[in-house]
Image (cartoon, rainbow, N blue to C red):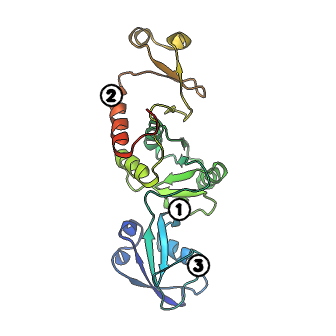
Amino acid sequence: MNGPEIQISFAPGLAVFVASERRSGSTAVTTDGVSSLGHVVESLGVPLTEAGRLLVDGRPVAVAHVPSAGEHVSVEGVTRPQPVPGAPLRFLLDVHLGTLARRLRLLGVDAAYENEDIGDPALAALSARERRVMLSRDRGLLRRRELWAGAYVYSDRPDDQLRDVLERFAPPLAPWTRCTACNGLLTDTGKEEVRERLERGTEKTYDVFARCPECERVYWRGAHHARLEAIVDEAVREFGATTP
């Protein structure tokens, strides 16, 4: 770049994306005089999915704003909870976030998940087609223009990932209503209807079942229920639920 010089600063929460010398205070950036501010921000490492308001000399501007010499730019983080207008709140997770997908489904959140690496272009197209918020730790994927919406998952720990998504988007929670395997909506079912799918010990021990009409998986309060219930109870205690 060989054009106007601007001063730019980033919110502390965006420090993970930018070079160490830009993590505190305002630093100088030389632009090309034609690129948008959004392009400049992304060229410095910050996906626009993670940028909130862009302020030029204290006033909000659009990402299409072309910086002029001497402007002071502040890049804020996204507002939390972050509104997602125009569609029911639904998510799409990439191949690396399978545990997070299952935990969101456990809480009744609509979370589609690709368990194979179908590639960034296909994921972005699916996000746009189904109007789903793309959740990923892949910064390159989150920079794709065809995404409908996206968000970076900051932690590699499932507990922290779940808390981050729930805090950022505040999705309505309806625990125990979705299939953790395929994301389908569960229906209550009697033992007689699923008896042939149960092992003898399960049939004798349990009486309450649910079934997924999409993949035919059967659910009951088995050996792992206490661990799953702890995840649900913690999320509901912190973020609330819309159904019992």
Locate residue 182 relative to residue 157 in the image: left or right.
right
Q: Quadrant of residue 232?
A: top left
Q: Quadrant of residue 223?
A: top left
Sequence-wise first label, 2 or 1: 1
For the point 54% across and 84% down, which residue is it? 67
Q: CA distance from mark 3 to mark 2?
A: 52 Å
For the point 44% across and 56% down, which residue is it? 81
For the point 60% across and 76% down, which residue is it? 64
The disc at residue 36 is: 3
Residue 125 pos. (x, y %): 65, 53
For the point 35% across and 31% down, which residue is it? 229
Disc 3 crowd, CA 10 A, few/some/many (<14, 14-19, 20+): some
The disc at residue 140 is: 1
Q: Where is 216 relative to 115, above or below?
A: above
Front residue of 218/31: it is: 218
Q: CA distance from mark 3 to mark 1?
A: 19 Å
| Amino acid under disc 1 | Gly
Front residue of 239/16: it is: 239
| Amino acid under disc 3 | Ser
Residue 60 pos. (x, y %): 51, 77
* Quadrant where the image shows the N terminus: bottom right
Sequence-wise first label, 3 or 1: 3
Q: CA distance from mark 2 to mark 1?
A: 38 Å
- Residue farthest to the right, as pictured: 129
Disc 1 crowd, CA 10 A, few/some/many (<14, 14-19, 20+): few
Residue 131 pos. (x, y %): 62, 51
Residue 37 pos. (x, y %): 54, 78
> Which residue is denoted by mark 2 in the rendering?
226
Q: Where is 89 relative to 140, above or below?
A: above
Q: Nearer the viewer, mark 2 or mark 1?
A: 2
Sequence-wise first label, 3 or 2: 3
